[in-house]
């Protein structure tokens, strides 16, 4: 039964990612990383279904660091609203930026009835004159423009406002199983430039003009998943979406072959914080 579920996920993955293939071969080819950052819409429904959410402790940690009321927030790259819903559930009015129309469609549906304004825009192009108590990004900051991201964050925060960047790797907790998955990925995925894999650091945040009191925290979390859900999440990862449908399906088949039916994954959230003085 589990194997059948994983097979269904892999079959669905064959239909995903076609937008990326069309975009990078078009005559008006854009910067490769900018295009890659807009590849998720082809798997928007899978993204909402399989991507990990975030624990309530994340909002607690951000609000504790803020040491002041947080009434408004700007989210960069909201996706389908995994983090959006968490912050809005605390009564924070969230302006959620999402540049991909298909992702924004799901975002509007998942945030209906809570204080969220969905805006179809990149971080770089947004500015309606408002300034925010909090600016945050959930596994999306690496898609922002490296030459302007920190200055833009400072510009869009009120004095005393907080910048919060976070994400979770969601890797198998068992080191043997993690190594088996990584071994397959080394064979099937293209090598990533290190500037793409590690596009920013807490040191960059600490050195940015207009930001102070940088801090980093890990919020430990372990959750149990199935082979089908794990491969489902992989088919929403940009490195997999870059592959052709056939190659992607074969890669997911090979990953699934090394997975047990159920296993634990390390869902620890890595949180980086700073504030505008």
Image: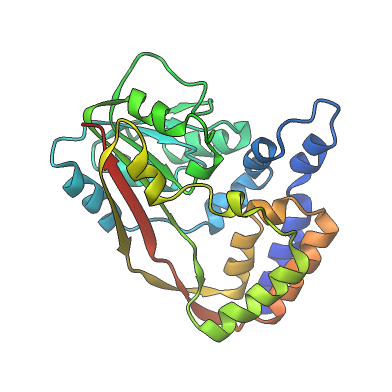
Q: Is residue 222 visible in the rendered structure shown here?
A: yes
Horizontal side of residue 66 vs 229, given as left or right: left
The percent coordinates of residue 71 (x first, y second) are: 22, 31
The percent coordinates of residue 141 (x first, y second) are: 48, 42
Horizontal side of residue 221 vs 92, given as left or right: right
The percent coordinates of residue 219 (x first, y second) are: 31, 63
Q: Name the residue located 30 percent from the left edge and 21 percent from the top edge.
A: 131
The percent coordinates of residue 81 (x first, y second) are: 45, 43
Q: Name the residue located 65 percent from the left edge and 36 percent from the top edge.
A: 34
> Based on the displayed image, in which of its 4 quarters is residue 250 positioned?
bottom right
Q: Name the residue located 59 percent from the left edge and 60 percent from the top edge.
A: 233
Q: Is residue 216 above or below residue 87?
A: below
Q: Nearer the viewer, residue 274 or 88?
A: 274
Q: Nearer the viewer, residue 214 or 118?
A: 214
Quadrant showing the N terminus: bottom right
Horizontal side of residue 182 vs 158, given as left or right: right
Quadrant showing the C terminus: top left
Q: How many marks?
A: 0
């Amino acid at each position: 039964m589990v194997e059948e579920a994983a097979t269904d996920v892999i079959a669905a993955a064959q239909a995903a990612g076609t937008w990326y293939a069309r975009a990078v071969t078009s005559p008006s080819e854009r910067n490769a990383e900018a295009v890659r950052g807009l590849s998720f819409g082809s798997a928007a429904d899978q993204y909402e279904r399989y991507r990990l959410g975030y624990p309530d402790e994340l909002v607690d940690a951000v609000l504790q660091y803020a040491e002041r009321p947080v009434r408004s927030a700007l989210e960069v790259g909201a996706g389908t609203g995994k983090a959006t819903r968490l912050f809005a559930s605390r009564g924070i009015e969230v302006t959620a930026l999402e540049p991909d129309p298909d992702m924004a469609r799901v975002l509007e549906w998942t945030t209906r009835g809570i204080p969220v304004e969905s805006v179809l825009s990149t971080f770089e192009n947004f500015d309606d004159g408002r300034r925010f108590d909090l600016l945050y990004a959930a596994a999306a900051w690496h898609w922002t423009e490296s030459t302007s991201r920190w200055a833009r964050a400072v510009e869009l925060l009120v004095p005393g406002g907080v910048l919060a960047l976070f994400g979770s790797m969601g890797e198998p907790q068992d080191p043997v199983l993690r190594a088996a998955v990584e071994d397959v990925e080394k064979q099937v995925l293209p090598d990533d430039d290190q500037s793409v894999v590690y596009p920013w650091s807490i040191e960059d945040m600490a050195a940015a003009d207009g930001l102070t009191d940088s801090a980093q925290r890990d919020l430990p979390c372990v959750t149990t998943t199935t082979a089908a859900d794990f491969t489902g999440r992989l088919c929403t990862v940009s490195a997999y979406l870059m592959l052709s449908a056939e190659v992607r399906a074969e890669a997911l088949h090979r990953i699934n072959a090394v997975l047990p039916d159920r296993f634990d994954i390390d869902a620890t959230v890595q949180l980086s914080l700073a504030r505008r003085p």
